Image: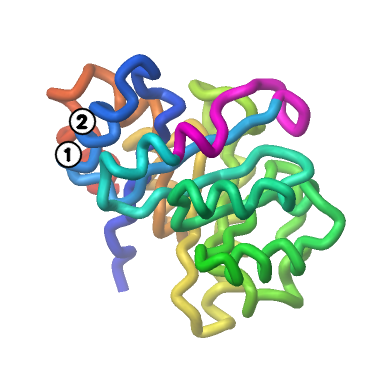
Amino acid sequence: MAPRAPLIAPSILAADFARLGEEARAVEAAGADWLHVDVMDGHFVPNITIGPEVVKALRPHVKIPMDVHLMISPADPFLEAFRAAGADIISVHPEAGPHLNRTLKQIRKLGAKAGVVFNPSTDPGVIQWMMDDVDLILVMSINPGFGGQSFMPSQLAKITALRAMIDATGRDIPLEVDGGVTPETAKQCVAAGATALVAGTAVFRGGPSAYAANIAALRGA
């Protein structure tokens, strides 16, 4: 069976921060499936981006799900704020707190979907015994903290391994990839089992008039 067309989640990290509302509306109109929001704290990763208030400000601008990736530690004290701000999916790193399972259950209790994010060095086995509590898996194909990095081919084997773990559950858990995603690397990710792609530069390059073509090129993978 041929791989299905992936969901496309433009990362606002690559958008014009002076026009975030307009940028969010533009990528939704161009065919984006989710809006990806990278939250960085300058502690867990070497950069600082945005907090719940920006998510809250963006929420009225789009109807598509807001896919919020927390690159923060600890994450637990901020789950409620991001959910209240409008996050539909909240994803955390296993390294961001001592009890990943408890964090995922709390995200679900708040009414959001719970995601787990794998750094390049993180072993997929960390979720082996708790797949029933996972709603999304995100593989970082770069080291998190900055946009515009090159794709790490070493992560394709991890995507394949996680695909097998998902298929064994019989559940339709999105397998997302973030980092250096272009039309070329997207093909490799989808072939390995990815069903959702985060893209910043590859979507926002060229300005609003190019967004639809950029998204179509990624989906064509």
Q: How is the image coloured?
A: rainbow
Type of residue at label 2?
Tyr
Q: Residue 14 carries which label?
A: none
Q: Do the residues labelled 1 and 2 touch (CB within 8 Å)?
A: yes
On the image, numbered disc 1 is attached to which residue? Answer: 30
Give the percent coordinates (x, y) of residue 94.
Answer: 75, 53
Residue 176 versus residue 207 in the image, above or below = below
Give the percent coordinates (x, y) of residue 25.
Answer: 22, 36
On the image, numbered disc 2 is attached to which residue? Answer: 211
Q: In this image, 139 relative to 203: left or right?
A: right
Toward the left, the furthest residue is 209
Q: Which residue is drawn at 40% across and 49% down?
A: 66
* Mark 1 neighbour class, 10 Å CA radius: few under 14, some 14 to 19, many 20 or more: some
Q: In this image, 164 relative to 57: left or right?
A: right
In magenta stretch: residue 59: no
Give the percent coordinates (x, y) of residue 177.
Answer: 50, 47
Q: Using the image as rendered, state which of residue 19 and residue 144 is in the foreground.
A: 19
User: What is the magenta range?
Assistant: 42-55
Q: Main secondary structure of the magenta part?
A: loop
* Mark 2 neighbour class, 10 Å CA radius: few under 14, some 14 to 19, many 20 or more: many
